Image (tube, rainbow, N blue to C red):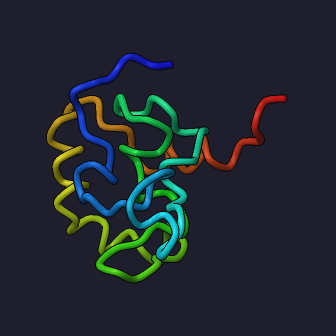
Amino acid sequence: MKERQSKLNCWEFKMCGRQPGGEHEIDLGVCPAPIERKLDGVHDGVNAGRACWVVTGTMCEGIVQGTFARKFKSCEQCDFYKTVREEEYPGFELSATLLGILRNPAPL
């Protein structure tokens, strides 16, 4: 298991409870960000916990968000997104890079 980092993942920052074992796992379902393994370690996060804006199906303000193209405009205004950009500057990974990682097939 990974050593715990001091940077927060989206579910910790937003306190949504949609991570596996979270308080809203049953009623709202598990969010795709904490289970998206292809982005594990990006910005020192667990799975896609610090790159949720590129993951389809995350929830924002109680509404499930669609594809990156449809949701990114609202993600740019998100306090978590802005925090990650600030914390990671100048090493913030561009969304195009992260989307490329997601599109690559998982290793066998």
Q: Residue 15 falls in which quadrant of the image? A: bottom left
* Residue at (38% x, 16% y) in the render: 3
Tell me: 84 left or right of 22: left
Q: Position of residue 26 (x, y in %)?
A: 52, 69
Extreme-bottom residue of the structure: 63
Vertical side of 50 occupied by 75: above or below? below
**x and y, in percent, of residue 17 in the image:** 36, 60
Q: Residue at x 52, y 39 (%)?
A: 39
**90 shown above or below 63:** above
Quarter holding residue 80: bottom left
Relative height, residue 27 to residue 44 (above, below): below
Asked whether, in this view, residue 10 is left or right of residue 71, the answer is left
Frontmost residue, 40 versus 69: 40
Q: Position of residue 95 (x, y in %)?
A: 43, 50
Lateral position of residue 88 relative to residue 4, left or right: left
Picture residue at 35% right of the left edge, 33% below the top: 43
Report the quarter where the C terminus lies. Answer: top right
The image shows residue 33 at horizontal and vertical percentages of 49, 53
Q: How many marks?
A: 0
Front in this rendered view, residue 30 or 77: 30
Q: Residue at x 22, y 65 (%)?
A: 78
Judge from the rendering whether residue 47 lies leftward or rightward of residue 5; answer left or right.
right
Q: With respect to residue 28, does 88 lie above or below? A: above
